[in-house]
Amino acid sequence: MQTLGRAPRLTRRNLLAGLGAACLPWPALAARQSVVLRPAALSTRIAGRRLDMLGFNGTIPGPEIRVRQGDQVDIRLENGLDDGALVHWHGLRVPNRMDGVNVLTQDVVIPGRSHDYHFALPDAGTYWYHSHYLSYDQVSRGLFGAFVVEERDPPEVDHDITVQLFDMMIDEEGRYDDSFDPAQFATAGKIGNVATAFVSRDGIRQGDRLRLRCINPSIDRIYELRLSGVAGNIVALDGMPLPAPRPLAPIILAPGQRCDVIADVTGPVRLTDTYGGTSVTLGEIAMEGSRTPRRSAIPGLPANAMPAPGPVDAHVDLVMQGGAGGGDHDGFGTWALNDVSGLPRRPLVDVRRGATVRMTLRNATAFPHVMHLHGHHFHELDARGASGAYRDSTLVGAGAARDILCVLDNPGSWMLHCHMLSHQTDGMATWVRVR
Ligand code: C2O
Ligand code: CU
């Protein structure tokens, strides 16, 4: 049973009626919620150990932000760190100024200062927030949390549970090991020796219907998440509903990725990581009692309103290079994209708002990478060019290639980077501009 490190839910402070209603799609129902996020050092118990790490509002994960589709949030970041702070809203299609990215969208918030973010939530789904400043370090120390946008008319379930998969390096004395060594940066990144699942609640009954919102905030680790004791469907990936839900099977979750599962409890619910052929128990959801199972079919989720792709306006090649045993490049750092390490002076793509862009992501390295685009979702394309699920992050295996199709309709400067945060830090990042 995972009873420690649970993320408290923020109490709703809904100031109904009128506020900013003119620009919201559901004027009569739109609400506005205020949240304060305060990153600071903390000492906390995780997986049976007391550890000195960082957290938002005194917890790891940070408080779960839970709003409804069409709502508006006002989030104040109060920097309680003795370092810079920035928060990025991963997967949410926010205005560019609210994206929380150093250099491209805002300045770093210095210690003791605060910064306000305001945005509306056009899409329902499972998202998350995390530090975007020295993120390989700050996220690995605990600066992340879930961001849930409920449907206006959510599917009927007994429990809506958030599951965050997290790994850490613990040294021989049982302390949190914050060191990074270059050999890790140049390979698969920093993979912890302890992995756990933060589960937002337990006390489920046999026969209950669950919605599990699974998030991978680990900096570099890929999971193959196996859920036992439940039968149902995968209904969303990276927050976006699947038009055709898939029967539950082990799910690959690379850093930053999410999946939503709706499933009925058939026995003890256990979460296991089977990536790479080893089996690691991540956690359980404690069960008490039972109920008569439902007869109704597992519901799906209503689609979000996404821009439709037009004819392809631009086709861009993006080559991932570098690392141990990987393709050469002219860039300065360990990793590079198209021969540049770190943000290039000019964007990879510079297009008019609404352009449809096809990208071929080619992995010329000896390690997998998960490429994440800010401010948009894109379609993964299969070998024949047919479009698959919407994603905000796509995993490309060593030596493999994947095409994606994006409608770049959100104006501004958006990062596109590997979400293995050690790789991002060491060069694997670029950006796109939408005018
Ligand atoms: Cu989840 Cu650039 O971030
Ligand atoms: Cu990478």
Image (spheres, rainbow, N blue to C red):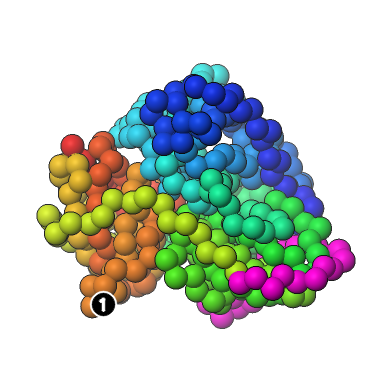
Residue 387 percent across, percent down from the top left = 29, 68
- Residue nearer the viewer, 50 or 174: 50
**Disc 1 Cβ-to-ligand 2 distance below 8 Å:** no
- On screen, 102 above or below 124? above
Number of labels in the image equals 1
Q: Residue furthest top?
A: 113
Q: Residue furthest front?
A: 28
Magenta residues (range):
273-297
Query: Is residue 211 something one can see in this rendering?
Result: yes
- Magenta region includes residue 251: no
Q: Residue at x 69, y 73 (%)?
A: 295
The quadrant in which residue 283 appears is bottom right
Q: Which residue has dot 1 on it?
A: 383
- Residue nearer the viewer, 158 or 295: 295
Residue 104 percent across, percent down from the top left = 30, 34
Q: The residue under label 1 is which amino acid type?
A: Ala
Q: Residue furthest bottom?
A: 277
Left or right: 158 as drawn, with respect to 400: right
- Magenta region includes residue 275: yes
At numbered mark 1, what does the secondary structure look like: helix, strand or loop? loop
